[in-house]
Amino acid sequence: MQPAPISMHIPDGFLSVQVSIFLWLIAILVIGYALKRVSADLGERQVPVMGVLAAAIFAGQMLNFAIAGGTSGHLVGAAIATILLGPWAAMLVLTCVISIQALLFQDGGLLVLGANIFNMAIVGVAVAYMVFRTVRRLTSGRSWSLFMGGFLAAWMSVEVSSLGTALELSVSGTSPANLAIPAMGGIHALIGIGEGLITLGALAFLSASRIDLLKANQAAQARGNLVWVAGLILALTLAIASPLASKHPDGLMSVAKQYGFLSNEQNPLYLLIPHYLFPGMENKTVATILAAILGTLIVFGVTFAVAYTRRHRPGAHEH
Amino acid sequence: MHHSIEVENLSYTYPDGTIALRDVSLSIEPSEKVALVGPNGAGKSTLILHLNGILSGEGKVHVCSQEVVKENLGRVRSCVGLVFQSPDDQLFSPTVFDDVAFGPLYQGLPSVEVQQRVNEALEAVHMAGYKHRVSHHLSAGEKKRIAIATVLSMRPEVLILDEPTGGLDPRSRRSLIHLLNELPLTMLASTHDMRMVREVFPRMIILDEGSVVADGPTELLMNDTSLLEAHGLEKA
Amino acid sequence: MHVHFLDPYRPRSSLIHKFDPSLKLVLTVGFILTCTLIPTGAWPIYILFFALVLSADVLSELGVGYVFKRSVLALPFVLAALPLILTVHGKTIFSLPIGPWVLSPSYPGLERFISIAIKSWLSMQTAILLAASTPFPDLLVAMRSAGVPRLLVSIFGLMWRYLFVLVDETMRLVRARAARSGKSDRPEAKTGRHLAWRARVTGGMAGNLLLRAFERSDRIYMAMVSRGYDGESRSLPLPAVRPAEWAALFASLSVLGILIFVAYSLWG
């Protein structure tokens, strides 16, 4: 069962190892820091609040609304989580959601989990926070300030996250930049509108039912300067880099190669094994057939071994 | 002949293999008030979910003379109003007005009519002044009545309720029983509240382990103590 | 009705099920890493890997169909790599003019696409095997061994506990909405109103869900405090790993290492 068909979770094999590891490192650093900040802010209440809210966001991603002709829209939740919990807690909550999705439902890979966390939990939250706070400041006092902020935060969060995803795919050589970036960016511009509308609906409900919760988080909102700056930098970088990369896909490739991000397609890491050690191996067809034979032997071997041990297990003789 | 609800040989098995309904057949006429009773796990909720097409099993289900199949679901849901056990799961709009208006709005009715329907529905549940209240802040009893209103605004022919008196204090329960007695609709209620059954529902269907074990006048069945006990029920 | 099918774990008494969860996690990630490192077009290595995954499937006694079915669900993302067939330079398979464009898929492009698809699919299957053969509480233990901070692991645990509860609530909200989504018998009425309204209603449902979760977390916190919770996550010490399992891990990682070596030297 697929919990949420959101197209931003990258599966394994799509990013080069270098990009995966690089983003893992960033994710570990940022989430590690988030843990410290949340400990300081929420104290001992953090485990129940974040655990249950993470479950709620996960479940919320299963909510759908009919778009047209059988397609439906879903919620990602970075913006509403940020507005409700503040940026650092929201990052943790979304990290939990994304990790569970990868571990249990293969919605996103394990090696590339760091990248997915970076795109959705870090970039998504930082950008949402930056936009929300900015809009609130600029329009403070107006009755629609909350809703405008929420809508724009949600839209930007989805759009910028998608640009990050597209860029990573391009840099890894998996998807050509001049296609991936416009495609991802374009589709998510539409998806972002859905996200914005859902966020609006959620804010309408919350502000009617528990405006005190939203107000309480104003305090948490104010202490997120670091996130605000990060959000701005990320949004600007991706907004500038994406059209550039899209127009010069080859240029992007050479930059990627220069910085070692491209998967090592053309560069052998190791010395060639002399021919006499594996005679005939240079011939790919021979090697393929040999591998197929060897593979089949392995599978049959294991199958027989399992069947054998099952028959001889205690209690296995009941029919 | 127009049956409000007609179920023919309905069977249903959950994806994990549990058999929930075995060859269930029943029919309910317009304006009848029927109680569906049985122990937990008997299949009452499962049966109810078939009546507006949320679940679909083997056999035939007709409501308001329409077959409950995918093409008809829109019409089916306009005719059969299903009120679930937990009001919190049904009140998902910011205000009472929004929740009660959802049904008519979804149907595409003009806004003047929507207003009218909302007023009507809230009147019927004696909560006319609650239009602009926030659903979340209401008491359990109030929420239950609003939940009924959200369905009444669609002017259904049949009202189906899952555990209507569950979790209510004696006062709220009493006023809900009054309400159910007043409403002139065809009614089917799944319930454990045997005393309410006696007061409101002249006919009773006993469901156990997915099968109908008895279907008859409440007065008659209520006096059959051994039958009741055999199916985990108590005499009221 | 409960959403038990959300849990991918299937209890069996296979070797894979009994293998230490922390080592299993390491092995899974190691395999995925190896898979990702294998260069394009190393078909014999892909075949061997496939055989290894299939063997692990058999060993786990989950039934080959189970893993296959679940892996197919996650496959659509593969399409993101489809353009490579057209954009990688090399010997063209054919040229198809469509309007102002000419589609010319190339052999190297096709090779690249298939390689990515295979690598992705194999990685997915190992992840499925891990989730299906390891109860979630054991995965939490594995995470702790891997160095995930205790606080985060506690949050995971609580999330897991309430995942099903909240997904149940979500399904009930969706059903409640469906039950009130009717069609009028008037021909001029537009069923479903408009998109923006539907999206906002869905948002209201999300808000409802989040709010109830928030208030539930209050009650959970009170229950925890009543049992002496003070903010520190404490748990039993990690279970010891048997020497045989260390040996198995070492052997497996060595095999993977050798395969990478071979792959690079011949096809790198």
Image: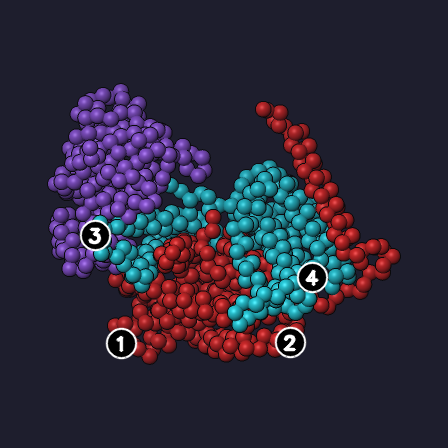
Chain colours: A red, B purple, C cyan
* Disc 3 from disc 1: Cα separation: 44 Å
Residue found at x 21% / y 41%: B159
- Comes first in the chain, label 1 or label 2: 1
Q: CA distance from mark 4 to mark 1?
A: 58 Å
Crowd rating for badge 2 (residues with CA inside 10 Å; few <14, some 14–19, many 20+): some
The crowding category of the residue bearing disc 3, from other C-alpha atoms within 10 Å (few below 14, some 14 to 19, many at least 20), is: few
The image quadrant where one finds the C terminus of chain A is top right
Where, by quadrant of the figure, is residue B130 drawn? bottom left
What's the CA distance linking mark 3 and mark 2? 63 Å
On the image, numbered disc 2 is attached to which residue? A254
**Is the residue under label 2 in contact with that under label 1 (CB below 8 Å)?**
no
Residue closer to the observer: C166 or C142: C166
Q: Nearer the viewer, mark 4 or mark 1?
A: 4
- Which residue is disc 1 drawn over? A141
Q: Say whether marks 4 and 1 touch (CB < 8 Å).
A: no
Q: Chain of mark 2?
A: A
Q: CA distance from mark 4 to mark 3?
A: 63 Å
The residue that label 3 is drawn on is: C186
Of the residues tagged 3 and 2, which is closer to the observer?
3
Give the camera-side residue of C94 and A19: C94
Q: Position of residue B128 (x, y in %)?
A: 13, 53
Q: Can residue A55 be seen by looking at this rendering?
A: yes
Query: Residue C60 appears at what percent x and percent y?
Result: 61, 41
Callouts 1 and 2 in the same chain: yes
| C103 relative to A134, above or below | above
Q: Which residue is mark 4?
A: C39
Q: Amino acid at mark 3?
A: Arg
Residue C242 in the image, given as x and y percentages of width and height: 67, 44
Q: Residue at x 49, y 62 (%)?
A: A8
